[in-house]
Amino acid sequence: LALDNALLESAAQAKGIASPVAGHAEVMVVPNIEAGNLLGKAVKYLGGSPCAHVVVGAQVPILIPSRVESAEDKLNAVALGVIVHSRS
């Protein structure tokens, strides 16, 4: 789904997209670290949402915290890393 459809059910409906995820996405997967960095900062700073970044695909999840992230965001990343690792 495109970002607007993943986050806004009304956007998906306007485009005729029927998906149980539309408007209810809790996790977004991006193709590379640059796109993830951009999306994460947009969600956090423009949307005011809590954020956690985890790189997957290695033997263990990789956490790459920003120097300006809050302690809460860093803890969210650790928690997400634990969840990802426990399910792999």
Image (cartoon, rainbow, N blue to C red):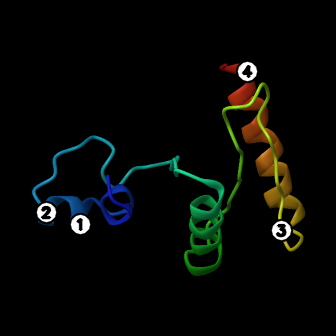
Q: Which mark is residue 69?
A: 3
Q: Residue 27 or 67: which is nearer the viewer? A: 67
Amino acid under label 4? Ser
Foreground residue among 17 and 30: 30
Residue that badge 4 annotates: 86
Q: Could you say which is closer to the camera, residue 20 or residue 85? A: 85
Question: Residue at image x 76%, y 37%?
Answer: 81
Mark 1–mark 2 contact, CB under 8 Å?
yes
Label 4: state its secondary structure. Answer: helix
The image quadrant where one finds the C terminus is top right
2 or 4: tag closer to the N-terminus:
2
SS at badge 2: loop
Mark 1: few/some/many CA within 10 Å (<14, 14-19, 20+): some
Disc on the earlier residue, 4 or 1: 1
Q: Earlier in the sequence, mark 1 or mark 3?
A: 1
Q: Position of residue 66 (x, y in %)?
A: 83, 66
Residue 59 quadrant: top right
Up/down of 78 relative to 10, above or below: above
CA gap, disc 1 and disc 3: 30 Å
Rendered location of residue 28, percent (x, y):
50, 50
N-terminal-most mark, 2 or 3: 2
